[in-house]
Image: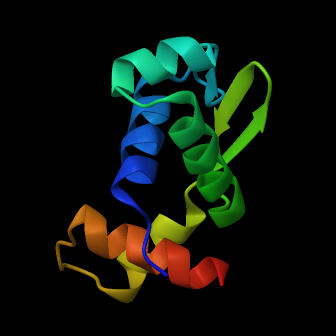
Amino acid sequence: MIITLTAAALYLFLVTVADARGLSYYSDRAVSQRLDMDASTLAQTRKELIRIGLIAYQSPLYQALDLDTLIEAANRYPGQLQSLAQIFKQIGEGAS
């Protein structure tokens, strides 16, 4: 399974605006405006990230979760750079 572009955008946004505990206090309306997503797309994208295990959500808080999967992927390919697409693909495969 491959992560969608909208899921990657939402995840990167949440990581960028998160506090030290990974929490984001942006409302759905604010997130939608900043990412130019309608409410339906945001809800669907949020569900995708929850299913994959990259975020937790309890209205109105988002939390970007620990990225152990990324560390494991980096350890499997030491010294090799990977694109975000490759990293997110590996995360998705690990969640299946």
Q: Residue at x 67, y 60 (%)?
A: 53
x then y, percent, for residue 72: 50, 76
Count the numbered circles shown.
0
Q: Residue at x 61, y 49 (%)?
A: 44
Closer to us: 46 or 52: 46
Q: Is residue 7 left or right of residue 36?
A: right
x then y, percent, for residue 61: 73, 22
Give above or below for 86 relative to 53.
below
Q: Is residue 3 left or right of residue 80?
A: right
Name the image quarter holding the C terminus. Answer: bottom right
Q: Residue at x 19, y 78 (%)?
A: 79
x then y, percent, for residue 41: 52, 41
Colouring scheme applied when the structure was drawn: rainbow
Q: Residue furthest right?
A: 58
Specify whether residue 4 is in view: yes
Q: Residue at x 28, y 68 (%)?
A: 85
Give above or below for 39 relative to 29.
below
x then y, percent, for residue 47: 67, 51
Give above or below for 68 relative to 62.
below
Q: Is residue 57 left or right of residue 43?
A: right
Specify whether residue 66 is in view: no
